[in-house]
Amino acid sequence: VESNNAFHLAVAEAARSTRLVKMIADYRAYFLDPHVLRRYDRAAMLRSHEQHEAIVTALRAGDGEAAEQLVRTHFQEAMAMALDQPTA
């Protein structure tokens, strides 16, 4: 949970977007709810971590389009997990 928080805040701060920082803080309260967290098994946590690494790789490469798509996929999967829905 700690590294997840650090990742999201680091990305938002690197973007220099106060709007993004606030949005991530607001979403974090929802996604870190105990009812949501207990849906994450080891495989789901690993998948999230791998998505974070891919996002960082795209950002470091300056590939904004890839980073955007990776973030969208990450968010969609996180929402599906939070809503207890299967992902595609």
Image (spheres, rainbow, N blue to C red):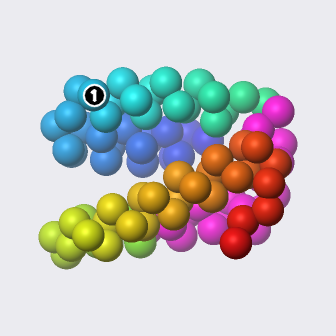
* Residue tagged 1: 19
Image-based side of 86 in relation to 30, left or right: right
* Image spot of residue 48 (x, y percent): 59, 61
Foreground residue, 21 or 45? 21
Closer to the camera in the image, 7 or 76: 76
Judged by its main secondary structure, the magenta piece is helix
For the question of whether residue 51 can be seen, the reply is yes
Residue lying at 53% horizontally and 70% vertically, measured from the top left: 50
Q: Residue at x 79, y 30 (%)?
A: 34
Q: Is residue 27 covered in magenta?
A: no
Quadrant housing the C terminus: bottom right
**Is residue 56 among what the camera can see?**
no
Q: Is residue 45 magenta?
A: yes
What's the residue at 53%, 31% (across, down)? Answer: 27
Determine whether, in the image, residue 29 is placed left or right of residue 25. right
Which region shows up in magenta? Answer: 35-53
x, y (%) of residue 24?
43, 33
Instruction: Give the quadrant of the N terminus.
Output: top right
Q: Position of residue 17 (x, y in %)?
A: 21, 34
3 in relation to 44, above or below: above
Give the quadrant of residue 72: bottom left
* Structural crowding at the residue carrying mark 1, measured as other residues with C-alpha within 10 Å and reported as few (<14), some (14–19) or many (≥20): few
Q: Secondary structure at mark 1?
A: helix
Q: In the image, what residue type sits under mark 1?
A: Arg
Residue 61 vs residue 19: left or right? left
Position above or below: 12 against 27: below
On the rendered structure, is 44 left or right of 5? right
The residue at 58%/55% (across/down) is 76
Number of numbered tags placed on the structure image? 1
